[in-house]
Image (cartoon, rainbow, N blue to C red):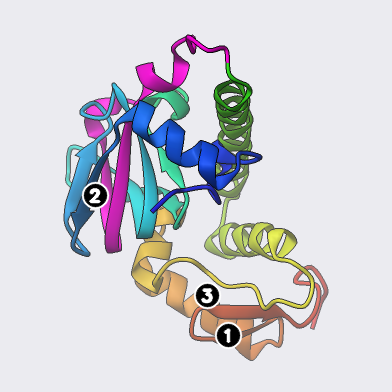
Amino acid sequence: MIPEENILFKGINKTDCENMMKCFNPDIKRYKAGSRIVTLSECSENIGIVLRGSAIMVRYDINGVRTIIENIETQGIFGELISHGLKRDSIEIVCEKDCEIMFVRKSEILKRCENACRCHSMVVENLLELMSEKAQTLSERIEVLSQRSIRERLISYLQIISDKTPEGVTPQIPFSTTALSDYLCVNRSALQREMTKLKSSGVLAFSKRKFKFLRNPDEEN
């Protein structure tokens, strides 16, 4: 599968993509849901591209408590190069849904092309854009975790998802309730109670992972 839809290859046609893949000599691997793909330290020399399925970036503390750092959907990218100083040894990439991952050595992407081809330069430009987007995502996560209460964290996160969802499309949480509690760093049962309160008070409507704001959460009942 040629990842021409991936941001790393944006603006590059299928033929050029195929030629670049021959040059990059990528390694494609498949993983089952729940399996560990790689630790961030093991991925120090590579960039991973999710061709199919989805994965999550997780951190385990010394007590084994899991925190989800990022959800990585199809065409998403991960690797030390774009992880902005995260402590590598404690970070794992875990397969959420059966995955097909393409690993490309970062040296192949960053090296100076002998032919000085435009498409290779575009890949580097796209990588810089991706790093900027990752920094924005990290900033949004800090904003969510800076909220004091479970309600505030949940609403802040859902508002970010809602703002990014195209008009006419119903926003959708990318996690199960358990994974969402790990992402928000809150107790699962407490999170479920807060979601029930928001639903019963007419602030939010839920349908499995899809949701909709029915009114401004800051308004009084």
Q: Nearer the viewer, residue 69 or 215?
A: 69
Q: Nearer the viewer, residue 79 or 8?
A: 8
- Residue at (67, 78) in percent of width and height: 170
Inspect the image, locate mark 1, and give the three-letter code of the amino acid beneath it: Phe
Provide the residue span drawn in magenta: 87-116
The residue singled out by tag 3 in the image is: 194
Q: Position of residue 7 (x, y in %)?
A: 57, 42
**Quarter the C terminus occupies:** bottom right
Q: Residue 206, which numbered label?
A: 1
Does residue 66 appear in the picture of this structure? no
Task: Say whether residue 105 is left or right of residue 31.
Answer: right
> Could you tell which of marks 2 and 3 lies nearer the N-terminus?
2
Q: Position of residue 15 (x, y in %)?
A: 52, 42
- Distance from disc 1 to disc 3, alpha carbons, whole Å, reads 13 Å
- Distance from disc 2 to disc 3, alpha carbons, whole Å, reads 21 Å
- Residue at (57, 51) in percent of width and height: 148
**How many residues crowd around disc 1 within 10 Å: few (fewer than 14), some, or many (20 or more)?**
some
Q: Marks 1 and 2: which is nearer the front?
A: 1
Q: Is residue 113 magenta?
A: yes
Q: Is residue 152 magenta?
A: no
Q: Nearer the viewer, residue 32 or 104?
A: 104
The residue singled out by tag 2 in the image is: 65
- Residue at (43, 67) in percent of width and height: 175
SS class, disc 2: loop
72, above or below 138, in the image: below
23, above or below 183, in the image: above
Q: Position of residue 200 (x, y in %)?
A: 62, 90
**Quarter the N terminus occupies:** bottom left
